[in-house]
Amino acid sequence: MDDGIQGFYKDKVVFLTGATGFLGKVIIEKLLRTTEVKRIYSMIRSKNGKDMQERLATWKKDPLFEVLLKLKPDALKRISVIAGDCADPDLGISGSDRKLLVSEVQIVIHGAATVRFNEPLHVALAINTRATRLMLQLAKQMKHLEAYLHISTAFSNCVIFRIKEQFYPEHLTCGSDAVLAMSELLSEQMMDKLAPTLVGDFPNTYAYTKALAEDVILRESGDLPLSVFRPSIIIATYEEPVSGWMDNLYGPIAFVYGASHGVLRLTTYKPDGYSSLVPVDYCANAALASIWQTSKEKSQRDTTSQPAIYTLVPSENNLLANPDFIDHILSVREDFPLTKMIWYPFVHSISNPRLFRLVAFFYHTLPGYFFDLALRLTGRKPRLVKLYRSIHVNIAMLEYFLHNSWHFETKSIDRLKVLMSAEDRRIYNFDMEALDWKNYFRKALFGMRLYLANEPPTKESVEQGRRLLHRLKFLHYSFVTLLCALAAFLVWTLVRLFI
């Protein structure tokens, strides 16, 4: 008898990589809160002077885990740390820990990755591709393995614009086995020099090495009960455990943060394109559901059949147009204004990337010099010009994705929803067709203010932000009026010269 997703995870032992990542933490929280999972082995590395246990201890104060710890105060005791690092040749896992994992683990979730677009090839290759092979080798030794989930990305095959739930080895310059063999023979410097040739049409080393990782899965997964999960760009939570939770500045979240502060005022994108965004809690739900289904179908897997692929992206019936993304952000600026804005929040877009670079000088760089001059005169450290350089570099790296749109096949994820019970669909919701984008961004902006800007959700704080917003709005439109008057005067002067 099928006890559903919650029943499936009862008393299971899970091994998760990428545990401290954005999605990894949400998966762990959802597992602990909604199931009676027996143990979660989390592979964690030391970072920024903090060892593994110190990094795990910070979760007790993380707002993401507040609901869980109120319901189950001892829930985090079910997490056991495994020292490891995907950049290490052997994943950095000790012999004793390997024996533990091999003898106990029933479910593997491999989510560790470097998501930096400008990562040197040798680094991205080690973490995103070689580690995938090493994880497969480890999983093949596990005596009780029921399901293995490889977390990829919807953009792993972004060199084409209609992407089905299948593998695309034909778009690689050479196979993963050859590239990994090359990386063992050549120096790191030589591999990085070969990057333009190896990466080929892929826009960055991240997408390329994730595509290589999928090739590793295709070539080497054998008869493992394995599936691939491809989420698109992951953003703040929508519904649970708390709305609008986010813990980092990257991609669209960094865009929202910069625009809300009045720092980012200009961007570039395809006007008739779409933003492929998915809430992180929906991703966690879809991942856990796909593992459940993978376990049910494991008897059907053999070395000749390809692993199932589950793609989570906005529904074709509920797409988010690029201009709507901007409008949703700005529509709630009066509701959740920040108290540390430097200018009235607005965002204009230039569809031509080359023209963007010119206009950005007047929107960003030139005002940045004036702002930094004011900081110097008041004895403070200048920072805005440097910040704008970083913003422009990041926009340039995202240009390929801002000026293209993709159509994704979602047959497997749609079928998964049908196979789930009504109760499971409620608990593990990932229905992108029913998602209310306007309501989502209202929650996300509130979350950004609370979790990233660290501004209290009090009436006094919001009123303080509104007072600043109204002052900046007056200054903004006064300045715009002045510029328009100056432009009209110049035009009138020129007309008089030629009449």
Image (cartoon, grey):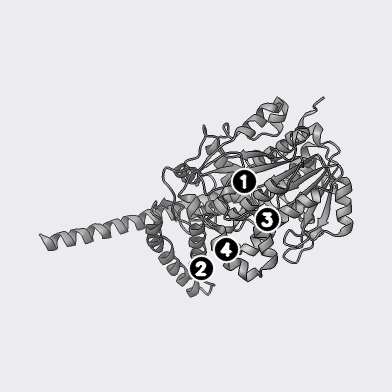
Looking at the rendered structure, the kind of residue marked 4 is Ala
Q: Work out which quarter of the rendered image holds the C terminus and state it.
A: bottom left
Tell me the element at label 4: helix
Looking at the rendered structure, the kind of residue marked 1 is Ala
Label 2–label 4 contact, CB within 8 A = no
Closer mark to the observer between disc 4 and disc 1: 4
Mark 4 and mark 1 lie on one chain; the one further toward the N terminus is: 4
Q: Which residue is mark 3?
A: 177
Mark 1 and mark 3 lie on one chain; the one further toward the N terminus is: 3
3D distance between C-alphas at marks 1 and 3: 36 Å
Q: Position of residue 153 (x, y in %)?
A: 62, 47
3D distance between C-alphas at marks 4 and 1: 33 Å
Q: Write the residue at 50% across / 62% down.
A: 393
Location of residue 294 with respect to 447 vertically, above or below: above
Mark 2 and mark 3 lie on one chain; the one further toward the N terminus is: 3
Tag on residue 386? 2
Q: Which residue is mark 4?
A: 195
Judging depth in this view, the residue of 234 and 309 nearest the camera is: 309
Q: Which residue is mark 1?
A: 236
Location of residue 253 with respect to 37 vertically, above or below: below
